Amino acid sequence: MAWEVKKFIEEKFSEVKKIVGDKNAVVATSGGVDSVACAFLAHKALGEKLTVVFIDDGLMREGEPTKVSEELGNLGVEVKIVNARDEFFKALKGIEDPEEKRKKFRDTFYKTLGKAVKENEASYLIQGTIAADVSETKKGIKTQHNVLEQIGIDPTDYGFQVIEPLREIYKPEVRDVARELGLPEEIHQRMPFPGPGLATRIIGEVNPQRVEMVRKATSIVEEEIKELKPFQALAVLMKDRATGMVEGKRVFGNIIVVRSVESKNAMTASVSKIPWEILEKIQQRITEEIPSVTKVLFDITPKPPSTIEYI
Ligand code: XMP
């Protein structure tokens, strides 16, 4: 069956309106295409009955909370920033196991949203979960931060019922929905960024110092690779270290991995063919701007057997 974006949006409008009725709802957005499309769809369907929140978990990219709230504000949607950094860092402290990290993230995310729902006297949480999130979680590949009911978790334990207007569609269709809703290209063609943020790019403990390191490296990679428009480009902080020389002294420094992939729907991915000069520039900037890094590697593994993120 051909994909009919207009019909899909109309159906979802009425579905959201009907379910929420005269109650209130909260939608969380991270600025990514899935959650922004979902927030706009819900905003158009519910108007004043909807509160849009941005959870500042301390795991976002440089300046992201302000950037996202300004961007959506300019498009007529007011965003409330909820500062929950301490809660997330406390929950993630000392945890190294990837799935345990993801589960702690998910639990803290929904507890924070539960509070927001209560404060706004809402009954529903509307979220931008898409088909790939559900399928990867159900297959046991990795726990996506925004999947609950499909794996037997009752959202009412967190104090709300969930509505997922995008749960049957994949990334390319989500981009069509965003375009059809009138969102600018800057949003509908935006590079995916995972819900658990930079925590998916840290091997070993997630703490503010380590997040800061990977945040800086991420900015450098995104800036230098931008013109190539890859599906997704990222930087990862390893737990291992490697000997290097800084100002003539031996340093047992950090290792950053650079990854860039091409994909349609994130279910499979190939490695981007990055010109050598760009890779060299990335290495130079990372080791200069983050002096504790003594080694920069480029990941040449497609998905499968790898996944895109590192946890
Ligand atoms: P993986 O690492 O599984 O990632 O190959 C596939 C795509 O999904 C993104 N990703 C997530 N998105 N919540 C999300 O909303 C998550 O928990 C999550 N984990 C991975 C990832 O960035 C890639 O685009």
Image: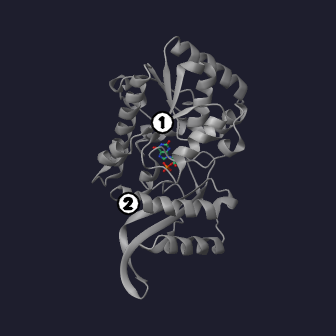
Q: What's the colour scheme?
A: one colour
Seen at 68% across and 46% down, the residue is: 186
Q: Which mark is residue 209?
A: 2
Q: Which mark is residue 134?
A: 1
Q: Position of residue 308 (x, y in %)?
A: 51, 54
Compared to 45, does 77 lie above or below? below
- Figure quadrant of the N terminus: top right
Dot 2 amino acid type: Gln
Q: Position of residue 276 (x, y in %)?
A: 64, 74
- Residue at the extreme top: 22
**Residue 1 appears in the picture as rendered:** no
Seen at 33% across and 42% down, the residue is: 87
Dot 1 amino acid type: Val
- Residue at the extreme left: 94
Q: Position of residue 234 (x, y in %)?
A: 53, 58
Place residue 223 in its image quadrant: bottom right
Mark nearer the viewer, 2 or 1: 2
Place residue 72 in its image quadrant: top right
Q: Which mark is residue 50?
A: none
